[in-house]
């Protein structure tokens, strides 16, 4: 399995699933349900309401989070899709998968330019602990690189570029 793809069984679950959970960022965000789409064995989604503190906007500044699929939490990284070809395929896949009368309003909405431009691909990421779940592994009296004690008992956060 390539490092940038989820295992086949996860992709197959999402190919038929009508909803998956997503937690955006590594902070204290909740898991919310979104509509997953599989195109070329890759997992995509679009944002319906592009809110200032919503999952899509959070992923723009902090592209790591968790997908909840089949009762499992999977670390993920968001990749913002620029390919017009892929965006066309995602639009087609929404139309085919969500083909009920009640879903048509949303399918048409997802095809609109402002939502089409929110197309995100989810790829696996190394396991990351949420900010409020981090505990220090530094033993009492151990020092950091500068020789001073880690006063907060928290590991130093590294920036991800």
Image (cartoon, rainbow, N blue to C red):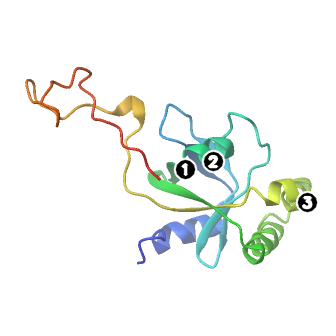
How many other residues sit within 10 Å of disc 2, few (<14), some (14-19) or many (≥20)? some
Indicate the position of residue 11 as horizontal and vertical percent values.
55, 69
Tell me if residue 121 comes above or below residue 150 in the rendering.
Answer: below
Quadrant showing the N terminus: bottom left
Disc number for residue 63: 1
Question: Marks 2 and 1: in contact by CB < 8 Å?
Answer: yes
In the picture provided, is 31 more to the left or to the right than 45? left
Q: Which residue is most to the top?
A: 151
In the picture provided, is 129 more to the left or to the right than 100? left
Tell me if residue 123 comes above or below residue 96 in the rendering.
Answer: above
Residue ID for mark 2? 60
Residue ID for mark 3? 108
Indicate the position of residue 136 as horizontal and vertical percent values.
23, 31
Tell me if residue 7 comes above or below residue 106 in the rendering.
Answer: below
Query: Is residue 100 or residue 127 the one in the foreground?
Result: 127
Mark 3, secondary structure of its residue: helix
Mark 1, secondary structure of its residue: loop
Estimate the spatial distance between the alpha carbons at disc 1 and disc 2, rounded to whole Å: 6 Å
Residue in the picture at 28% in, 29% down: 154
Residue in the picture at 77% in, 43% down: 50
Indicate the position of residue 48 as horizontal and vertical percent values.
79, 48
Question: Marks 3 and 2: in contact by CB < 8 Å?
Answer: no
- Sooner in the amino-acid sequence: mark 3 or mark 1: 1
């Amino acid at each position: 399995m390539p490092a940038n793809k989820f295992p086949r069984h996860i992709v197959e679950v999402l190919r038929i699933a009508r909803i998956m959970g997503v937690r955006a960022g590594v902070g204290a965000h909740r898991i919310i349900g979104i509509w997953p789409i599989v195109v070329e064995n890759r997992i995509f989604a679009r944002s319906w309401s592009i809110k200032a503190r919503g999952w899509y906007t959070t992923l723009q500044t902090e592209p790591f989070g968790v997908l909840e699929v089949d009762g499992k939490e999977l670390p993920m990284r968001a990749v913002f899709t620029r390919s017009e070809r892929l965006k066309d395929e995602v639009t087609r896949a929404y139309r085919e998968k969500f083909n009920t009368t009640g879903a048509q309003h949303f399918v048409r909405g997802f095809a609109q330019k402002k939502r089409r431009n929110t197309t995100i691909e989810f790829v696996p990421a190394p396991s990351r602990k949420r900010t409020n779940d981090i505990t220090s592994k530094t033993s009492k009296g151990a020092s950091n690189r500068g020789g001073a004690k880690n006063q907060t008992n928290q590991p130093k956060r590294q920036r991800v570029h």
